[in-house]
Each structure stands twice: as structure tokens, then as C-alpha cells.
């Protein structure tokens, strides 16, 4: 975190794996839209990279595509991390991430090392196509604006 950053938005994903590009797409959409003191980061979800990205932040908002939730592709989730674990994870299941070592590992590691942000909120979208290639499915692509709006709402409400 650079001096003066109060919050960070981290888009996790890989734009070359179809719906997995949702996190980076939201970060791209937020460029020029976030308040001063908010940093935008794109990450592949590697735990040490996530710890570094949210280091010193009062608020970290993570955006990711998930799989194995209870809804169809395009369904949006908002999950609050508390005490090093994700509340309401049961709705998504323990293997929701599309990254073998990712957010869950980063939270556990950050909790053990005392390196969690003051508050962490995950905005996720249920993906359907994680195959190789550019471009998201219609179901996921059609909710990117809504996902970005949800992140902006949290920034406004949680930084007030």
C-alpha cells in the first residue's frame, strides 16, 4: 500500500480464462471512478501477492469469479471476511475459488501473520465458463457493470 491509500480494490483473475476475467474487468471499469485514496490492483490470486496488495489498508474489496455456488452463472455474491475467514462461505462452498491457492489461503495466512486489512469484503460472480480464451460468457459479461456499481457503493458506504 502506498502512503495515503485508505482502501484497495483487488480484481482477481485471468482474462485468458473466459469468466475468470471478471475481477480484472471490474478493476478496468473502475479506473477513474474510485475516490482519492483508493488503489486498484489486478492479481492472479497468489496468496503472497494478495497479502502485499492489502497491506496497511483500512478496507480491501476483492472481486473474483467463483464456481460451485448455489446460483446460475451471473449470480452476484457479497461476502464479508471476519477473523480470517469468510462469513456465508457455506452459500458458495469451500471450493468456490477457481484458483488452487487463492483468497482462502491468503486469508488464513494473513490471519496467522496478523496481516489482514481492517475490513475485507469479497464481491463475487458465479462463473460458468473457465475454459481457455478471451471474453466472458454473456451471463457474466452482462453483470460486470452491476458488480462495479456494488464495489463503488461499498467504497462510498464503508469509507464514510
Image (tube, grey):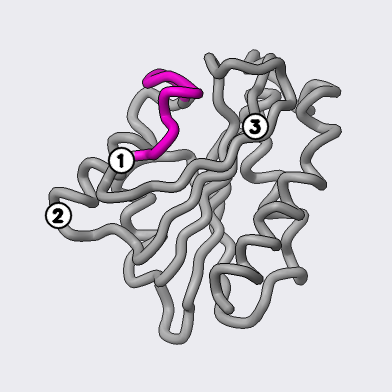
42 or 89, which is in the foreground? 89
Task: Identify the residue position indicated by label 1 in the image.
Answer: 85
What whole-number distance in Å separates the C-alpha atoms at marks 2 and 1? 14 Å
Cβ atoms at labels 2 and 3 below 8 Å apart: no
| Residue 18 in picture, x, y percent from top left | 70, 24
What whole-number distance in Å separates the C-alpha atoms at marks 2 and 3? 29 Å
Task: Identify the residue position indicated by label 2 in the image.
Answer: 113
Cβ atoms at labels 2 and 1 below 8 Å apart: no
| Residue 139 in picture, x, y percent from top left | 81, 23
Residue 85 higher or lower than 55, as above or below: above
The C terminus lies in quadrant: bottom right
Which residues fall within the magenta stretch? 86-96
What whole-number distance in Å separates the C-alpha atoms at marks 1 and 3? 19 Å
**Is residue 15 highlighted in magenta?**
no
At x 48% / y 78%, what residue is drawn? Answer: 5
Quarter holding residue 130:
top right
- Mark 1 secondary-structure assignment: strand
Quarter holding residue 14:
top right
Of all residues, the one furthest to the bottom in this rendering is 4
Cβ atoms at labels 1 and 3 below 8 Å apart: no
Residue 107 higher or lower than 29, as above or below: above
Nearest to N terminus: mark 2 or mark 1: 1
Residue 50 higher or lower than 33, as above or below: above
At x 52% / y 55%, what residue is drawn? Answer: 61
Left of 4 or right of it: where is 146? right
Find residue 125 and name its label.
3
Badge 1 crowding class, 10 Å Cα cut-off, few under 14, some 14 to 19, many 20 or more, is some
Badge 2 crowding class, 10 Å Cα cut-off, few under 14, some 14 to 19, many 20 or more, is few
Amino acid at each position: 500500500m502506498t502512503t495515503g491509500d485508505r482502501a484497495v480494490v483487488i480484481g482477481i483473475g485471468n482474462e485468458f480464462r473466459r469468466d475468470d476475467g471478471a475481477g480484472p474487468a471490474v478493476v478496468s471499469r473502475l479506473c477513474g471512478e474510485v475516490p482519492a485514496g483508493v488503489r486498484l490492483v489486478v492479481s492472479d490470486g497468489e496468496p503472497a501477492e494478495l497479502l502485499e496488495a492489502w497491506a496497511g489498508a483500512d478496507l480491501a474489496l476483492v472481486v473474483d469469479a467463483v464456481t460451485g455456488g448455489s446460483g446460475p452463472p451471473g449470480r452476484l455474491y457479497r461476502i464479508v471476511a471476519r477473523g480470517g475467514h469468510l462469513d456465508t462461505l457455506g452459500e458458495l462452498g469451500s471450493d468456490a475459488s477457481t484458483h488452487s491457492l487463492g483468497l482462502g489461503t491468503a486469508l488464513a495466512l494473513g490471519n496467522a501473520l496478523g496481516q489482514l486489512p481492517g475490513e475485507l469484503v469479497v464481491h463475487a460472480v458465479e462463473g460458468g465458463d473457465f475454459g481457455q480464451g478471451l471474453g466472458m460468457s454473456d451471463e457474466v459479461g452482462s453483470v460486470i457493470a452491476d458488480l462495479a456499481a456494488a464495489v463503488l457503493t461499498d467504497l462510498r458506504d464503508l469509507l464514510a
